[in-house]
Amino acid sequence: MTGHHWQKRGGRCVWEAGSQRAAHCGEPGLIRPFSDRSRLTRFTIVDLSWIARHSDGTSVYRVHVHIVILGCGRVGSLLAAWLDQQGHSVAVVDQEPSAFRKLGPDFTGITVKGVGFDRETLESAGITRAHAFAAVSSGDNSNILAARVARETYGVEHVIARIYDPKRAAVYQRLGIPTVATVTWTATQIMKALLPTGASEEFTDPTGTMTLAEVPLDQQWFGRNATELERQTGARIAFVTRYGAAVLPGPALVLQEGDYVHLLFPPADRERIEGIALFREKGNS
């Protein structure tokens, strides 16, 4: 393994096989070699911007982190399973031990019975070394209290809470706690399916020069090649959501009913692109 090195913005930390000096100090992280999944080596890393690379620049290692999840319902158990499959260290907290059955026999993380905003419970789940915390239990109060404890008491960098009440979600969002308003999101998705009204903005870059938006399509587009949509609108297809999964567009991708197309374009072109997508306006020849 000699010849590999740690790279970080603005510098590097060189290490050699058998060396214990991987970095200065910080939380322990799991480094899994892509070429040999049976080998797990523990190093000390400074933060997640450190990645291991060959001297020729190709990535060979991925940093795995510890994540705490409050709530082992449908969302929590699915999230835990996904993260566990990716090799991350996962701890799931729930008041009902029977809820942990949803994790299945292949789950390799830990489970902790207790109240999600209780410090002793959180520390048993490894909150002091957690990179992220997700509060997705069935109670708004428990979720927001636990999220605040994780953020304000333990300084967890990435915290998110699921909130059912849209008004409360907006308040906590303004307080700096990212939330997912389940009711609002569900109602919005249904409204978009019932009454497509135009592009739904998903992201605009800080300079305001480029927007990513989900753009509804008229049925006349179904059966046509995705490249034709790009040619006529002058926009770039970032990805297509099909059957709930994101698909990267290739030259052979044909648009079909049920597709959600996510386009990149300058904000000033929004109305023109919507018009072409809905066949209200003629596109580029």
Image (cartoon, helix red, strand yellow):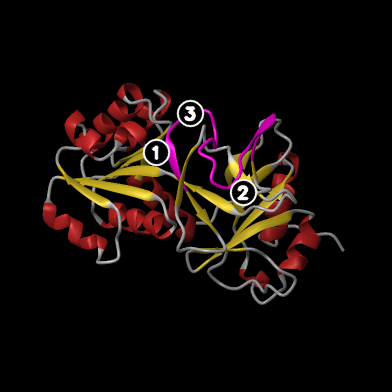
Q: Residue at x 18, y 61 (%)?
A: 101
**How far apart are labels 2 and 3 at the CA level?**
41 Å
The residue type indicated by label 3 comes to: Cys
* Helix, strand or loop status at disc 1: strand
20 is within the stretch colored magenta: yes
- Residue located beneath label 2 in the image: 213
Answer with mark 2 or mark 1, whichever residue precedes in sequence. Answer: 1
Q: Amino acid at mark 1?
A: Ala
Residue at mark 3: 25
Residue furthest front in the image: 18
Magenta region includes residue 78: no
Q: CA distance from mark 2 to mark 1?
A: 27 Å
- Label 3 SS: loop
Q: If you read the primary sequence from the N terminus, does the residue marked by circle 1 or circle 3 appear first? A: 3
Picture coordinates of residue 121, whole percent (x, y): 18, 36
Magenta span of residues: 6-30
Q: Secondary structure at mark 2?
A: strand
Residue 182 visible in the picture? yes
User: Could you tell me which residue is drawn at 72 percent across and 49 percent down?
Assistant: 57
Residue 43 picture location, percent across and down: 48, 41
For disc 1, the marked residue is 132
Which is nearer the eye, 205 or 59? 59
